[in-house]
Image (cartoon, grey):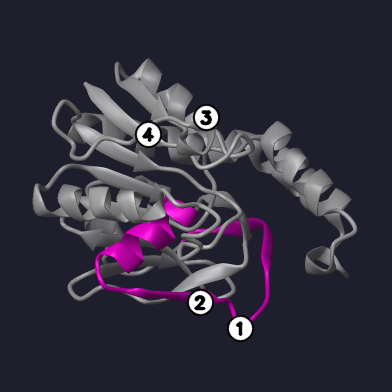
Amino acid sequence: MSLLVVQHQDSCPPGRVGQWLTEAGVELDVRRPYAGDALPDDLSGHDGLLVLGGEMSCGDDEAAPWLPAVRELIRTAAKGATPTLGICLGHQLASVALGGEVAVNPAGRTLGVLTVSPTPELAQDALFATAQGGPVAQWNNDVVTRLPDGAVRLADNERGDLLLARLAPAVWGVQGHPEADLHVVTGWAVKDSGSPAVVGIDLPAVLGAVKDAQPQVDATWRPVAQAFAALL
C-alpha cells in the first residue's frame, strides 16, 4: 500500500500518524514541495492521500505556490474514491477544494487539547467512529465555516467548532493534530511565544495538557490510523 503524503513545512511532519500507518504496513511517499519535491499530476501508483498541516492558510497560494496542485489532487481523489485524510490545513484545503468555505475563527485562535464531541453520524463512520469522546491537540486560526455539498459533520469540539467531517464518500478531515506529539507542539509554542496570537494564553499550561493527554490521544487515534490503512 502506497500513500502519498503532502508535507507543507518541517515543523508539521507525519509524526505519530505516519508511525501508526507504517506499523500497519503502509509505505509513505512523503513529498515536501516547500523543499523542492515535485507533486504528481494524479494519484496513479498511490492507494491514498494524506495532506498534513501548516501555518499558512488554505488560500495562501503566493506564499505556498504548490497549494493549487494539492487542491487538484484532493479533487482527483474525491472523483476516484481514493481514500484521503486531511489534517488541520489539509482538512481546510480539502473542504475548499470540494466547494466549502474557510475563514478566520470569529471566536479566536484555538490552542490546547480539545475533545471530540460527536454528532449522531459519527458512530457509523468508517474512519472516525472510534474517536468519539477522545482528546486531540488543536493549534489553528482558521476553521471550516461551510462544508461542501453532501459533506457530513461528524464532530465538534467543546467550543462548537467543526472538528471532524466526511467531506466526500472517501475524503475525511480533522481540524486537530492527532499526529503531533509534545516535541512537535513545543516547537509551535516556541515559535509563537511573544506573538500577538498567543497574548493571554498560558503556553506552559497548554504544553502540560498536551503531555498529560498523550496516552489517551494515542489510544484514540491509533485505531483511526489503522482504519485508514484498512481502506487503502
Residue that label 2 marks: 103
Mark 2 or mark 3: which comes first in sequence? 3
Report how far apart the C-alphas of labels 3 and 4 lie in the structure.
13 Å
As rendered, which of 219 and 47 lies closer to the eye?
A: 47
Q: In which quadrant of the rendered image does the N terminus lie?
A: top left
SS at badge 3: helix
Report the mark closest to the observer, 3 or 1. Answer: 1
User: Which amino acid type is shown beneath numbered disc 4?
Assistant: Val
Residue 49 drawn above or below residue 172 = above
Q: Is residue 42 left or right of residue 213?
A: left
Q: Farthest residue in the left direction?
A: 80
In the rendered structure, which segment of residues is drawn in magenta? Answer: 87-116
The CA span between labels 1 and 2 is 8 Å
Circle 2 crowding by C-alpha within 10 Å: few under 14, some 14–19, many from 20? some
In which quadrant will I find the C terminus?
top left
Q: CA distance from mark 4 to mark 2?
A: 25 Å
Q: Which residue is mark 3?
A: 16
- Residue 94 shown left or right of residue 12 in the figure: left
| SS for dot 2 | strand
Q: Earlier in the sequence, mark 1 or mark 4?
A: 4
Give the labeled residue for mark 4.
5
Q: CA distance from mark 2 to mark 3?
A: 28 Å
